[in-house]
Image (cartoon, rainbow, N blue to C red):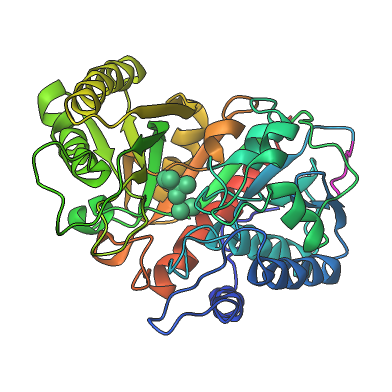
Amino acid sequence: MDFKNLHINGKRLQSTLEEMAKIGATPGGGVQRLTLTDEDKQARDLFVKWLKELELDITIDEMGNIFGKRAGKNNDLPPVMSGSHIDSQPKGGRFDGILGVMGPLEALRTLHENNIQTERPIVIVDWTNEEGSRFAPAMVSSGVWAGALERDYAYGRTDINGLTFLDELERIGYRGKAPAKKWPVHAYYEYHIEQGPMLEREGLIIGAPKGILCLHWYDIYLEGEANQVGPTPMEGRHDALCATAEMILKVNQLPDKMGGNMVATVGEIQNYPNSRNIIPDKVHFTVDIRSWDDDLAIRAWEDVKADFEAIAHSRGCPIKIEETWRVEHSPFDEKLVQRVLKTAENLGYSNLHMVSGAGHDASYMNQIAPTAMIFVPSIGGRSHVEVEATTWEDCEVGGNVLLHCLIQSANEN
Ligand code: HGY
Ligand code: MN
Ligand code: MN
């Protein structure tokens, strides 16, 4: 069958995204669907309802990952898989993650209504807790499924209120029975917004990243000495927040200092007791270091850790450091990446071979199957913000590229 003129229903994709954006909608036009919250549950329930309408074989595993399997002519063959995440950042955007779940849903709907049966089965997936904002680290459930992280480690992670991942997974009723254990996958595609400025800057539509940077996450805890701000002389203070301020600037200066292609960010901080007339005595903050060069990222960490220890010592603020999480850089299967570029070309879409600075579940899927991603432009290069946006036309274009990549991979032996 010639699939050349087959395309997805862009309006229907748009309406599923608009439907999902109502769940956890924020006043600024974004969404807040933190993992394992009621909003996450509501969106999951809607997703499962849509999977049932397509008569897919639905599996929910012990990490709450949701799989929908569309039978192929030969169900003994390893499936082609595509998915992303329904959870969002606090005050996040309406496209990050969810486009990569609604995209394959739209592709399966298109196959269904055209009675197209592929050789191999096709599996769509929603990965639990890709963002890692409420429960660090990120991509934890694809990590467990791929065998890179332990289930019970993930279960024990706690949010800022001390609730565990397991508590919340059970509370929303998505702790499935199926083991979160990988099975053979023929190819994995993840459809996602770029979350950066490259495609828009180059005036191109489809991005095919060669892979994803390494992500290294650290948690830093500082102890100071609380006191009344008025009578306590500046001399001899142990101000945990001042120590932190020095450390944050060291992180910000790190990429220049290391002279390599990397980024380093402090994104989260808690300061206690956080009262304007008490000298802070406890601070927790996070460090995120990313690079295509894992060794450079590790050298950078060793360097800034030494600075942290020197600052902590000079200010008399004992420091505790947790090397929370590392996922190495993920070079994708170049053949599959070229398929994305070629498919875009054949469909008449401009395209760009690039790299992903954002982490994705594809980082872990890349450890067990040939993996590639399909990017579409983020307006203004913005993401993880309420103003995150991508045009509906570009969403449709990316969905068409995904549809044709899925068909090609699902029909190859
Ligand atoms: O951190 C990331 O890049 C992803 O949003 N989890
Ligand atoms: Mn994402
Ligand atoms: Mn994200």
Residue 260 in the image, given as x and y percentages of width and height? 17, 24
Q: Nearer the viewer, residue 39 or 162?
A: 162
Residue 357 appears in the picture as rendered: yes
Residue at screen point 57% across, 41% down: 139
Farthest residue to the bottom: give it: 27
Q: Nearer the viewer, residue 123 or 144?
A: 144
* Horizontal relation, residue 237 to residue 378: left or right: left
* Horizontal relation, residue 238 to residue 149: left or right: left
Residue 174 in the image, given as x and y percentages of width and height? 80, 57
- Give the residues in magenta: 71-75
Residue 251 higher or lower than 400, as above or below: above
Q: Main secondary structure of the magenta part?
A: loop
Residue 221 higher or lower than 281, as above or below: above
Residue at screen point 41% across, 81% down: 29
Residue 327 in the image, given as x and y percentages of width and height? 49, 27
Q: Nearer the viewer, residue 17 or 7?
A: 17
